[in-house]
Amino acid sequence: SQFIQNLESDTNFIGRMQYLNSSGYGMPLGFTYEVGYEIRDVTQYNSNTYKYKQGLSGQRTIDWDIQASSFQDGLIHSHYASLNSIFTPEDVILMAQLFLGNHAKDSNNLFFAVTSSYGVPNLMKVGNPAIFRAFCEKIVGATGEDTVKMAKFINKFELKIDSYDPDLNEKNFLQIIKYEYGAENGLVLYQGNAGCNSWKKRRVDNFGYVSTIPCVTPE
């Protein structure tokens, strides 16, 4: 999509993603907690548009403290060592809640990205907004607060996505979105390179084979 192409050349976004994708002492993937940015305007970089956040030591979440009247382009964060290579169910739930709560600065392109010690970063974004909205309501309810639906989604997710194999996690993530929720075109997954400046759309077929889909048609 044009939005993804813009991210691939956006030095503000690339710089922050590269920082989150850095390992070693004193760098995000070497921390014992998650760090990230609430991005209010992806095209500009300052403390008001990229709001730095960090989680507590040993926890796999960040308390993003999203302000009621705020709008987001997206959220990006790191998973420190031993955490999953792909998004947690809580990440997906928060994205759904932001969308249903009308926090998306652009409801066609709300996105989340994650880095991990497994290497390749991942990015998920709204594809078809109507399909995405239906998916959101299935996992968090129409108001975004259905705890029973959330618990069901988390359980379904954690049963299938808890591997040290990032390829298997990616495949299971795509299969859950496609087959369990019929939302393949609603929530689109992209795999990035180490430099965080190239993103390929990923799809899973009926045989469980994951492939890259060329971005030639608008989403």
Image: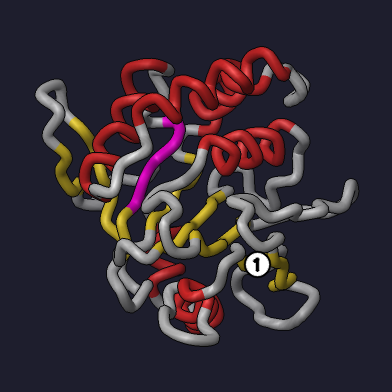
Residue at numbered disc 1: 37
Judge by depth and name the residue closer to the eye, 91 or 155.
Answer: 155
Nearest the eye: 35 or 113: 35
Q: In which image quadrant can residue 156 be found? A: top left
Which residue is nearer to you in this view: 112 or 126?
A: 112
- Amino acid type at mark 1: Tyr
Does the magenta portion include 73?
Answer: no
For the residue labelled by badge 1, is the local secondary structure a helix, a strand or a loop? strand
For residue 125, above or below residue 155: below
Q: Residue furthest front?
A: 58
Can residue 38 be seen?
A: no
Percent across and percent down for residue 32 are: 57, 67
Q: What secondary structure do most residues of the magenta stretch adopt?
A: strand
How many numbered tags mark residues here? Answer: 1
- Residue 194 location in percent, x, y? 30, 74
Image: 191 above or below 148: below
Considering the image in quadrants, where does the C terminus appear?
A: top left
Residue at image position (70%, 34%) is 97
Q: Where on the picture, by quarter, is residue 180? A: top left
Q: Where on the picture, by quarter, is residue 51?
A: bottom right
Q: Residue at x 72, y 67 (%)?
A: 53
Residue range in magenta is 186-190
Mark 1: give few (<14), some (14-19) or many (20+) Cα within 10 Å: many
The answer to whether residue 151 is above or below residue 214 is above
Residue at image position (44%, 30%) is 158
Q: Where does residue 68 sit, x and y in percent of width and height?
A: 89, 47
Question: Which one is nearer the viewer's eye here, 131 or 39?
Answer: 39
Tell me how the rendering is colored. secondary structure
Q: Is residue 149 left or right of residue 15?
A: right
Q: Residue at x 63, y 15 (%)?
A: 149
